[in-house]
Image (tube, grey):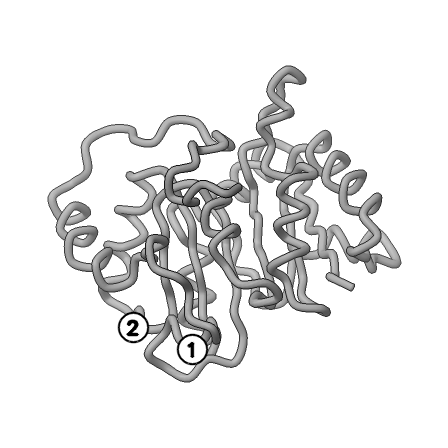
Amino acid sequence: MNEPRRQRATEAFFGRRKGKHLRDSQRQAMAELLPRIGLDLDTPPPRDLAGLWPVAIDTIRMEIGFGAGEHLLHRVSENPRTGFIGVEPFVNSMGKFLLALQDRNPDNVRVYTDDATRVLDWLPSASLDRIDLLYPDPWPKKRHWKRRFVNPANIERFARVLKPGGSFCFASDIDTYVNWTLQHLIADQRFDWQAQSAADWQTAWAGWPGTRYEAKAIREGRTPAYLSFVRL
């Protein structure tokens, strides 16, 4: 931990970094927007994290692995006074997101194109109001479970960067990953799962726009779960 964070090797919670070639429009969007809204982890974060955005910010949220960005795009437009940090290591997904973002006001979003743990380690303590981890790679084979993003080391990171009263929100259609997440978070006394009935975890959060992964899960007969844990 004494070495510069930018030199730490990725912890490999994701698979491949790139698929087919980007379309010209996606490459152009990345070339134009990344210099404007990409996080620079080689510089320290502002003491008041709201200073990352050029507009007035009341709350700060981070979405880890936003895919093509349907959810993040919706939230950015829905909540102009919320500062969003979106992390997505898959280049093709980042290209799609930035192309869609070009037609919107990106003043309340910042992005990072690599390992989310680097952003979590860079952030000041107690600086986030919410972390979203939505339909992450379930790594279904038992020998790969160690690559799941929900693990003791990352829960420690969540606990450090979330404000008291902040939330860690997790969605998945994979029963083993839902149970895994419940077991890990319930065992940590810094977090409280406040569900009182099945409806609390079967019902999506307010303003939920849905995602393509969710739609596929429902088509294939799987039931999504939506878990919310409050940082005590």
Q: Quadrant of residue 20?
A: top left
> SS class of the residue under badge 2?
loop
Between 183 and 162, the one lying in front of the other is: 162
Please report the residue visible at 62 percent of the width from the left and 66 percent of the height from the top: 126
Please report the residue visible at 19 percent of the width from the left and 38 percent of the height from the top: 22
- Badge 1: residue crowd in 10 Å (few <14, some 14–19, many ≥20): some
Q: Position of residue 51 (x, y in %)?
A: 40, 76
- Badge 2: residue crowd in 10 Å (few <14, some 14–19, many ≥20): few
Between 29 and 152, the one lying in front of the other is: 152
Please report the residue visible at 53 percent of the width from the left and 53 percent of the height from the top: 210
Q: Position of residue 171 (x, y in %)?
A: 63, 47
Q: Quadrant of residue 151?
A: top right
Q: Quadrant of the C terminus?
A: bottom right
The amino acid on which the numbered mark 1 sits, given as a three-letter code, is: Pro
Q: Is residue 19 above or below residue 114?
A: above
Q: Which residue is mark 1?
A: 80
Extreme residue toward the right, this view? 196
Please report the residue visible at 62 percent of the width from the left and 43 percent of the height from the top: 154
Q: Are marks 2 and 1 in contact (CB under 8 Å)?
A: yes
Q: Position of residue 14 (x, y in %)?
A: 47, 32
First in residue order: circle 2 vs circle 1: 1
Q: Which residue is mark 2?
A: 105
Q: Is residue 8 left or right of residue 160?
A: left
The amino acid on which the numbered mark 2 sits, given as a three-letter code, is: Asn
